[in-house]
Amino acid sequence: MEESIKTKIKGTLVYEDAVCFVIVPEKQATAGHLQIFPHASYTDVESIPKDVFVQMFFVASYGATALFEGLKAHGTNIVLRDGKESNGVYDYVYIDVVGRMQNDNVMNLWQPKQLDEATQAQTQARLKEEAFYVGKEIADEKKEIVLDDDQQEAVDEGNNYKIKNFYRMP
């Protein structure tokens, strides 16, 4: 694997794992702007391995949740930047997660474009095919939980406050 691009990116590091890292950029679009980069440099989306791509979007989703809960953002924009073609700050593939507030006066600077019917049908078919697998890989990895006698007794008798909370009516 090639050297991480982390040294070339300007901003404050807020998260890092084996696949990607997250920074708060020096020049933020809004309070709560995050950028997610893979460690390796990819110049177009097609060159990213599926596991890296999935992890980047997982981290982006988690970042958006953190913006909602931590900064009380009213919404978020998650924007995939496709290297040189994206008009982004960097020539690498990365994801912008922008926390949005009502009346924040941040404009979306892109114009939507209409896809031709063939491209739209192909895109929908590919998304549907991939969406079929969402959550199924995790379901296969379930492990049996072994409870000791006291824990099993608490569950059997309904004395577990954690379980009771699921059934509590407000």
Image (cartoon, rainbow, N blue to C red):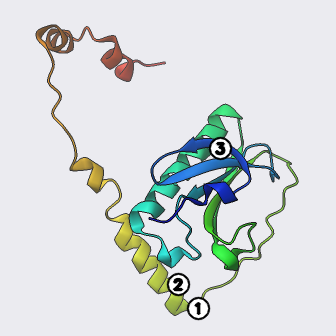
Q: Secondary structure at mark 1?
A: loop
Which is nearer the eye, 17 or 166? Answer: 17
The residue under the point 45% across, 61% down is 52
| Earlier residue among tags 2 and 3 | 3
Q: Which mark is residue 116?
A: 1
Q: Secondary structure at mark 3?
A: strand
Place residue 49 in its image quadrant.
bottom left
Type of amino acid at the residue the image marks with label 2: Gln
Pointers 1 and 3 in contact (C-beta within 8 Å): no
Mark 2 residue crowding within 10 angstroms, few (<14) / some (14–19) / many (20+): few
Identify the residue at the far front of this view. Answer: 3
Type of amino acid at the residue the image marks with label 1: Asp
Type of amino acid at the residue the image marks with label 3: Leu
Residue 128 image point, x, y percent: 39, 71
Q: Secondary structure at mark 2?
A: helix
Camera-nearest label, 2 or 3: 3
Q: Which residue is mark 2?
A: 120
The residue under the point 40% across, 79% down is 125
Pointers 2 and 1 in contact (C-beta within 8 Å): yes
Q: Is residue 30 above or below residue 82?
A: above
Image side of residue 11 versus residue 170, left or right = right
Quadrant showing the N terminus: bottom left
| Earlier residue among tags 1 and 3 | 3
Q: Which residue is mark 3?
A: 13
Q: CA distance from mark 2 to mark 3?
A: 38 Å
